């Protein structure tokens, strides 16, 4: 609701995004991010917006101000849930790539839409990715996507419309049920409202995740790893090595 209301109030007052940013004492890029639903204003900013346009904070948050009847409907995604994306920007008003390390993965499930939580994450930039989209980096765990190993950082581009994801696309999926996982997506949203998640390692079986359980999806666009690929080693061979290691570990545990 804040997204549509802010855009409506700004245009009604005749302000540009830059002019509104100056009045609110924030960066212009943040006004754009708020209006596009890619970030959520802090409480102090919401109060300033309400004061600037002489409306109540409650009306700003709960009512559709562009509707004369006052009976607004929150803007929702194609999947039926409101999604707010918090971001950070650098000194040149360019979006950063925030890094979600393994130790922060659990906290991310609760803080993914909290600007203060996102501001505490490490951040960097990769110029080769360009400016077409919002990017975030996630450190992955496990061997389900070999030859990409545990500890690799996957850089993903935020997916706004999940129905556009093509089958076989590698993505970071954030959900309350599974946490942060890296899988290939097979899109069944139109038919059954689920995504089918596949691992590249055949040891792991595919499984389905219902749309209502999903919080965010980031299409994998790049990765950063300190482990170099082993030459002339097929995925089947890697899987075999992992299985052998797992069997050896089980034997050692039994001996202990």
Image (cartoon, rainbow, N blue to C red):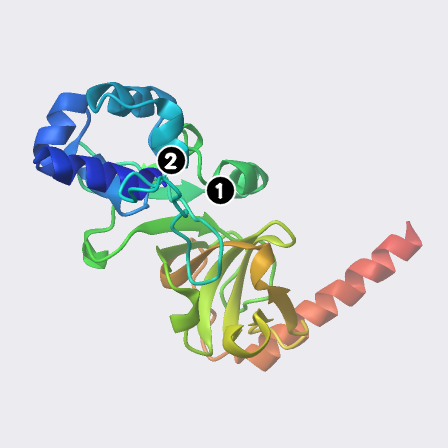
* Disc 1 from disc 2: Cα separation: 9 Å
Please report the residue visible at 43 percent of the width from the left and 70 percent of the height from the top.
Answer: 163
Count residues near mark 2 (Cα–Cα under 10 Å), then give few for <14, some for 14-19, many for 20+.
few
Q: Position of residue 189 (x, y in %)?
A: 52, 72
Label 2 near label 1: C-beta < 8 Å?
yes
Q: Position of residue 78 (x, y in %)?
A: 43, 63
Q: Does the rendering let one see residue 96?
A: no
Q: How many discs mark residues in the rendered view?
A: 2
Q: Nearer the viewer, residue 243 or 81?
A: 81
Residue extending farthest to the right is 255
At mark 2, the secondary structure is loop
Q: Compared with residue 14, is residue 51 higher up or lower down, i.e. above or below?
A: above
* Position of the N terminus by quadrant: top left
Q: Compared with residue 117, is residue 234 higher up or lower down, i.e. above or below?
A: below
Does 208 sit left or right of 227 as displayed? right
Residue 234 — which label? none
Residue 160, quarter of picture: bottom left
Q: Compared with residue 56, is residue 118 higher up or lower down, i.e. above or below?
A: below
Q: Position of residue 223 (x, y in %)?
A: 38, 59
Residue 101 — which label? 1
Q: Nearer the viewer, residue 178 or 248?
A: 178
At mark 1, the secondary structure is loop
Residue extending farthest to the front is 69
Count residues near mark 1 (Cα–Cα under 10 Å), then give few for <14, some for 14-19, many for 20+.
some
Q: Does the rendering let one see residue 117?
A: yes
Does 15 sit left or right of 189 as displayed? left
Q: Position of residue 5 (x, y in %)?
A: 28, 39
Q: Compared with residue 199, is residue 118 higher up or lower down, i.e. above or below?
A: above
Q: Nearer the viewer, residue 40 or 148?
A: 40
What residue is shown with label 2?
122
* Label whose residue precedes the other's in the sequence (1 or 2): 1
């Amino acid at each position: 609701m804040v997204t549509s209301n802010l855009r409506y109030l700004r245009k009604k007052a005749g302000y540009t995004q830059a002019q509104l940013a100056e009045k609110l004492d924030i960066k212009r890029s943040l006004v754009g991010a708020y209006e596009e639903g890619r970030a959520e204003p802090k409480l102090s900013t919401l109060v300033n917006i309400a004061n600037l346009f002489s409306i109540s904070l409650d009306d700003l948050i709960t009512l559709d101000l562009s509707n004369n009847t006052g009976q607004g409907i929150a803007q929702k995604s194609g999947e039926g849930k409101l999604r707010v994306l918090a971001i950070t920007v650098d000194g040149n008003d360019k979006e950063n790539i925030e890094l979600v390390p393994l130790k922060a993965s659990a906290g991310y499930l609760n803080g993914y839409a909290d600007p203060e939580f996102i501001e505490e994450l490490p951040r960097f930039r990769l110029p080769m990715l360009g400016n077409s989209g919002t990017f975030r980096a996630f450190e992955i765990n496990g061997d389900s996507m070999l030859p990409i190993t545990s500890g690799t950082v996957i850089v993903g581009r935020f997916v706004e419309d999940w129905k556009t994801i093509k089958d076989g696309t590698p993505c970071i999926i954030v959900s309350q049920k599974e946490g942060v996982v890296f899988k290939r997506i097979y899109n069944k949203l139109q038919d059954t409202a689920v995504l089918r998640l596949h691992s590249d390692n055949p040891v792991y079986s595919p499984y389905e995740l219902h749309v209502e359980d999903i919080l965010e999806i980031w299409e994998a666009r790049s990765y950063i790893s300190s482990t170099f690929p082993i030459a002339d080693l097929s995925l089947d061979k890697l899987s075999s090595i992992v299985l052998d290691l797992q069997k050896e570990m089980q034997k050692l545990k039994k001996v202990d």
